[in-house]
Image: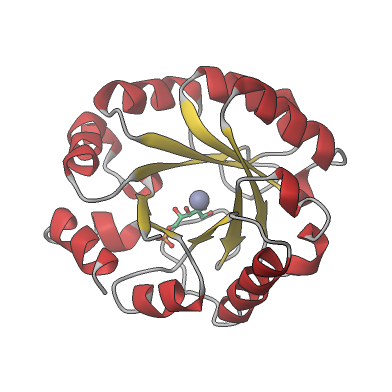
């Protein structure tokens, strides 16, 4: 599986409708929505009103990445707001199972994410209960950072764990991804790649999306 999920964090918010429609026309299958609360990460991005504007401009799957503490308080609202996938951070909650159950109850796909310092091993038990694992390849909080090379081994280890358990869990990778490393990441076992600055900073974002998918 090869999916691209452009991160709207790098879009031009003065032209959000235009930028979302570009993604809608493009070869990207998902639209990545980064929600930051200023507590789990040292930055604040956007919430429901902005997501609503994005939802209006595309029918594609909204891939929501929650970088917020106590995600269980909000996961249902993000599903109601049109998320196709709701991903929360393993490190952000004391109740991983409860959070999974809440998302499952909405009908959205369930995603769980780990920060660069969190080993994939912590996911062994919950793996059968989630649809997607999001491996952070930068410290969450900001776009435009450099890819952390150690993430490749985490992808390979996770791929092996998924295979061992006979699952079909999707592996998504987020942070510092461009046409330069996309191929290596797909080869290591990633199914879906998030890209913000590489897409929206390109002279021709639609062509850049194709380059990454065909890398
Ligand atoms: C970082 C976000 C990423 C970010 C990726 O906390 O989760 O989705 O937008 O941006 P780039 O592709 O620029 O690293
Ligand atoms: Zn993200």
Residue 74 in sight in this render: no
Give the residue at x 19% y 35%.
21
Residue 4 in sight in this render: yes
Task: Give how far across and how far down residue 215 sits, in percent.
Answer: 26, 74
| Left or right, 90 with reference to 197 | right
Q: Nearer the viewer, residue 9 or 171?
A: 171
Res 120 quadrant in image: bottom right
Task: Give how far across and how far down residue 62 sits, in percent.
Answer: 42, 35
Q: Nearer the viewer, residue 34 or 183?
A: 183
Task: Give how far across and how far down residue 180 sits, in percent.
Answer: 31, 79
| Left or right, 49 with reference to 101 | left
Task: Give how far across and how far down residue 17 sits, in percent.
Answer: 22, 29
Residue 53 in the image: above or below residue 97? above
Number of marks drawn: 0
The way the protein has been coloured in the rendering is secondary structure
Q: Residue furthest front?
A: 166
Give the residue at x 73% y 44%.
129
Residue 150 in the image: above or below residue 140? below
Q: Nearer the viewer, residue 101 or 15?
A: 101
Give the residue at x 32% y 46%.
29
Res 68 quadrant in image: top right
| Left or right, 31 with reference to 73 | left
Q: Quadrant of the N terminus?
A: bottom left
Res 3 quadrant in image: bottom left
| Left or right, 138 with reference to 20 | right
């Amino acid at each position: 599986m090869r999916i691209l999920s452009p991160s709207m964090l790098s879009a031009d918010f003065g032209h959000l409708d235009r930028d979302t429609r570009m993604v809608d026309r493009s070869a990207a299958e998902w639209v990545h929505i980064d929600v930051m609360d200023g507590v789990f990460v040292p930055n604040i991005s956007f919430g429901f009103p902005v997501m609503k504007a994005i939802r209006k401009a595309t029918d594609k799957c909204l891939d929501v990445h929650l970088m917020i503490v106590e995600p269980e308080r909000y996961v249902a609202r993000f599903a109601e707001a049109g998320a196709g996938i709701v991903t929360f951070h393993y490190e952000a909650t004391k109740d991983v199972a409860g959070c999974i159950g809440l998302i499952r109850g909405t009908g959205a796909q369930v995603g769980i994410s780990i920060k660069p310092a969190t080993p994939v091993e912590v996911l062994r038990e919950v793996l059968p209960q989630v649809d997607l694992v999001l491996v952070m390849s930068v410290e969450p909080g900001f776009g435009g950072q450099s890819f952390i090379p150690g993430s490749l081994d985490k992808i390979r280890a996770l791929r092996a764990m998924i295979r061992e358990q006979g699952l079909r869990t999707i592996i998504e990778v987020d942070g510092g991804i461009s046409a330069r490393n996309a191929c290596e990441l797909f080869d290591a076992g990633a199914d879906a790649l998030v890209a913000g600055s590489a897409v929206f900073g390109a002279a021709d974002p639609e062509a850049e999306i194709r380059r990454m998918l065909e890398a």
